Image (cartoon, coloured by chain):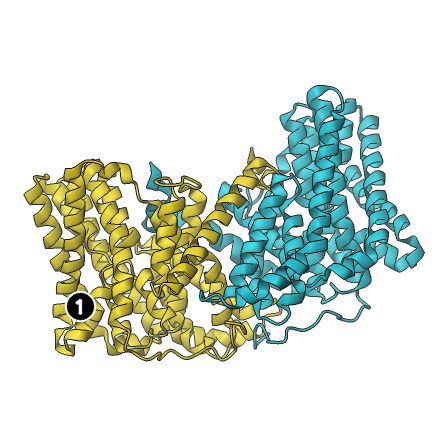
Chain colours: A cyan, B yellow
C-alpha cells in the first residue's frame, strides 16, 4: 500500500523501532566520542567502535537497514561537502601534480600487495585481482573528519590528501570497471572503460574549472530569494545535485559533494551557511561512523586461517599506502610523507563495495569478502590515532568560525 | 546480507535512486515554497502541492518509501522540538485551562460531525466511528510552521493552539484505543484504555513539571563535555529520546519532541543550539511536507459519489474544528476564536493513521479510507492561507535570533 511508510510510522511499533535505531546509534556514537576525547583518543575511532558494540556482532541492539545505510550515506556526503567548503579550487590546483603522483603510487602499490598475498594464499587469479582492487580506494571521510576536528584542513599536506583522494577515487573507478569486465565478460572492454574514465575526469575537471565562477554568478539571485535561509537551501541543493550527478557517471557521490562545497567555498565565506551545514552534518555524521562499525561480522573470521589472512591483509593495506603515497611525497620530507601516507590509509566503504561486486559476480569467496570487510573497518580504526600523533605538533590553521557555532563549546 | 544497505548504496544504482529521491523532494519543495512566497501564499501549502506533483498521482518521479517516511517523521519531530524550544512551560500552564476546553470541544464536535455524515451515507456503525475518530486529531506541525514563519509563536493564541494540540493528541489516543477495542474485540476494554490514558497524561505532566528543572541541573555537565557542539548533541539526543519514550506509551513522538524542546527552552536561550537545530530542521522539514502531498491517491476518488463525500467530509472537518474550538475560545472574542479554530484545522498524518488502523481491522472500506486521506491533505492545504489572513494584522512577537542564522536573509 502506498501510504504504508508515511503516517503509520508516526504512531506505531514501526515508528518506535525507527526512533529506537536513531536514538541508539546517535547516543552511542556521542557517548563513545566523549569517552575517547577524554582518553585523548580520536573521537572518530570511538564512534566506529560504538557501531561494533551496538551492531549485530555484539549487543545486537541495531542492525544495518536501508534507513541506516541512507543516513550513513547522507552523513558522509555532507561531511565531504563541508570539507569542500573549506577548500578553494586554487588550493587543489596548486597541489595537483603532487596529489596525482601520490594517488597513482598509492593505487599501484596496494593493488600489487593485495594481488600477491591472495595469490600466495592460493586464491584464483580473478579473486586476487578483486582483493587487490578493494585495497586501492581511500575513504577520505575518516581522515577529513580527524583533520577537520584538529583545525588542520588548510595545511598543504591536507590538501594533497584531499586532491589525491579525488584522483584515487577516479583511478579506483577505472580499476573496478576493468576487473568487473574481466570477471563478467572474461576480457577487457576498452571502449566502455575509456568512456567511464573520460566522463569521470571530465566531470571533475569541469566542476573545478567553472563551478566557482558559475556559483558566484548565481549568488545575487540566491540572495534575492524570498524563501527562508536561501543560501543554506541553495548549498544543500547543489550538494545533493552534484552528488546525484556523480552517481550518474558512476563516481562516488562524495566526490560530487566535495566539488559542490569547493564551488561554494568563496561565496559561502560571507554567509552563515557553512555553520548551518555543519549543524546538519553533526546530526548525520554519527550514522556514517556507527554504520562502519556495524559492518563487522565476527563470525566470518572464526576460522584461524581466515583471521590470520585478514590481519596480514590489513597490515599490508596500511604499509602499502604508507609506502606508495610516501614515495610519491618523499621529496617533501619524511614527516610530511608519513602524514600523507597515513591520511590515505582508511579504506572504509569503497573497498567493501568493490569486494561486494566481486561477490555478486561469484569472483570473490565469502572468506575473501570477510577479509576485505575486516581490512576496511580495521584501517579506519588504525589510522586516526596515528594521524593525531603525526599531526600533534601542527598548529591549528583553519579559520575559526566568524560567528561562534556554539557559544558554549 | 548484512552489509547490503551500507556500502553498496555509495556507488551503485541504488545510491543514485536514493539521491534522486532526496534531490527531487528537496528541490521541488523549495522551488514551490519560493513560488508561493512570491505569490504571497503560504510556503507550506506550496511544499505540500510540490509533493502532489512529484508524487505517484501526477509526475510519479518519487514514491513514498520507508526512507521518505523516516525523513518525514524526523522532519516533523524536529519541527515540534524547535517549537518547544520557543515555548516555556509557564506559557503553557498559563493557558492550560482554556487550551483544555478548546481541545475537548474541538474533539467532540468533529467526531459527531464525522460520525453523522458517514451514517447518513450508509456506512456501518463501526466505519462511521472510525471516520469520526479520524476527524479528531489536529496535526499541529502545519500551523506551527506557518506561525513560526510569521514570528507569532509567542502570541497567547499560538500557545493555546499548541497546548490544545498536545491535549488533543492525548484525547485522540484515547478515542483510538476505544474504537480499536470496539473493532477488534467488539467491546470496550476499560482497564487497557485507562492505562493508556493514565500513561499518556502522566508522561506529559511529568515532563512539563520536572523536565526544565532536570535539564537546568544537567546543563553544567553538558557544558563540560569535551565532544564538539555539546549542547546541540545533548538537545538532539533529548529530542530523540523523549520522542522514543512517547512511542513506548503510544503517544505521537512529536509530543515527546515538543516536551523535550520545552524542557530545554530556558537553558537553550544562552546557546546557539536553537539556530543549529533550526538548520537541521530546514533540511528535514521539506520531506515532511512533500510526503503529505505524495499521499494523494487521485484514483480512489474517481467515482463521483466518493469524491462528493470527500468534499463534504472536508468541509465538515474544517467547520467542526472552527465551531468546536471556536466555542471553547469564544470568550476571547470572535477574531481570536477564529484564529484558534483555524489553527486546529489541519489533520495531516494523524487522521490517516487512524483510518489506516481501521483499514487494517477491516472496519474501514478503501473508499472511506480514500475520503479520510483526501480530508487530511485538503485540510492541511486549506488552513495555511486562512491562517495567514487571520493573523495578517498581528505584529511579529517572537524574539529574533541573537546571532543571525543567515546573514543574507
- Would you say A177 lies left or right of B81 here? right
Q: Residues within 10 Å of mark 1 (few under 14, many from 20)?
A: many
Residue lying farthest left?
A: B120
- Would you say A330 lies left or right of B270 here? right
User: Quick one: quadrant of the N terminus of chain B?
Assistant: top right
Circle 1 residue: B102
Whole-percent x and y of residue A193? 73, 31
Report if residue B7 is visible in the image: no
Camera-side residue of B388 and A64: B388
Whole-percent x and y of residue A231? 54, 65
Whole-percent x and y of residue B128? 12, 44
Quarter of the image for residue A244 reads: top right
Report if residue B64 is visible in the image: yes
Camera-side residue of A369 and A225: A225
Camera-side residue of B250 and A206: A206
- Would you say A2 lies left or right of A265 here? left
Chain identity of mark 1:
B
Task: Write the residue at 71% across / 23% down.
Answer: A183
Amino acid at each position: 500500500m502506498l501510504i504504508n511508510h508515511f503516517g503509520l510510522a508516526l504512531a506505531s511499533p514501526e515508528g518506535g523501532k525507527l526512533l529506537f535505531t536513531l536514538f541508539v546509534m546517535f547516543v552511542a556514537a556521542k557517548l563513545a566520542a566523549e569517552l575517547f576525547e577524554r582518553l585523548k583518543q580520536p573521537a572518530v575511532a570511538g564512534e566506529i567502535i560504538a557501531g561494533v558494540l551496538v551492531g549485530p556482532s555484539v549487543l545486537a541492539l541495531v542492525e544495518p537497514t536501508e534507513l541506516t545505510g541512507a543516513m550513513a550515506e547522507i552523513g558522509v556526503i555532507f561531511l565531504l561537502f563541508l570539507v569542500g567548503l573549506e577548500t578553494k579550487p586554487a588550493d587543489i590546483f596548486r597541489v595537483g601534480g603532487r596529489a596525482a603522483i601520490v594517488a597513482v603510487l598509492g593505487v599501484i602499490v596496494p593493488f600489487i600487495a593485495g594481488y600477491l598475498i591472495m595469490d600466495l594464499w592460493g586464491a584464483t587469479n580473478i579473486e586476487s585481482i578483486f582483493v587487490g582492487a578493494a585495497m586501492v580506494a581511500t575513504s577520505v571521510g575518516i581522515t577529513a573528519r580527524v583533520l577537520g576536528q584538529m583545525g588542520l584542513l588548510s595545511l598543504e599536506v591536507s590538501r594533497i590528501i584531499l586532491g589525491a583522494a579525488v584522483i584515487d577515487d577516479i583511478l579506483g573507478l577505472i580499476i573496478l570497471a576493468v576487473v568487473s569486465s574481466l570477471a563478467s565478460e572474461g576480457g577487457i572492454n576498452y571502449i566502455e572503460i575509456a568512456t567511464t574514465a573520460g566522463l569521470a575526469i571530465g566531470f571533475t575537471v569541469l566542476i573545478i574549472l567553472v563551478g566557482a565562477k558559475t556559483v558566484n554568478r548565481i549568488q545575487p539571485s540566491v540572495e534575492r530569494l524570498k524563501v527562508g535561509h536561501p543560501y543554506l537551501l541553495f548549498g544543500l541543493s547543489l550538494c545533493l545535485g552534484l552528488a546525484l550527478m556523480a552517481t550518474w557517471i558512476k563516481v562516488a557521490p562524495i566526490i560530487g559533494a566535495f566539488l559542490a562545497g569547493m564551488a561554494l567555498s568563496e561565496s559561502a565565506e560571507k554567509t552563515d551557511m557553512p555553520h548551518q551545514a555543519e549543524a546538519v552534518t553533526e546530526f548525520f555524521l554519527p550514522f556514517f561512523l556507527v554504520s562502519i562499525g556495524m559492518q563487522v561480522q565476527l563470525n566470518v573470521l572464526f576460522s584461524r586461517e581466515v583471521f590470520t589472512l585478514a590481519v596480514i591483509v590489513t597490515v599490508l593495506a596500511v604499509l602499502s599506502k604508507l609506502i606508495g603515497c610516501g614515495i610519491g611525497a618523499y621529496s617533501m620530507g619524511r614527516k610530511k610523507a608519513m602524514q600523507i601516507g597515513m591520511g590515505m590509509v582508511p579504506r572504509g566503504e569503497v573497498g567493501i563495495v568493490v569486494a561486494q561486486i566481486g561477490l555478486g559476480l561469484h569472483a570473490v569467496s565469502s572468506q575473501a569478502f570477510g577479509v576485505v570487510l575486516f581490512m576496511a573497518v580495521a584501517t579506519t580504526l588504525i589510522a586516526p590515532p596515528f594521524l593525531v600523533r603525526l599531526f600533534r605538533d601542527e598548529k591549528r590553521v583553519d579559520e575559526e568560525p566568524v560567528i561562534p557555532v556554539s557559544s558554549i563549546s
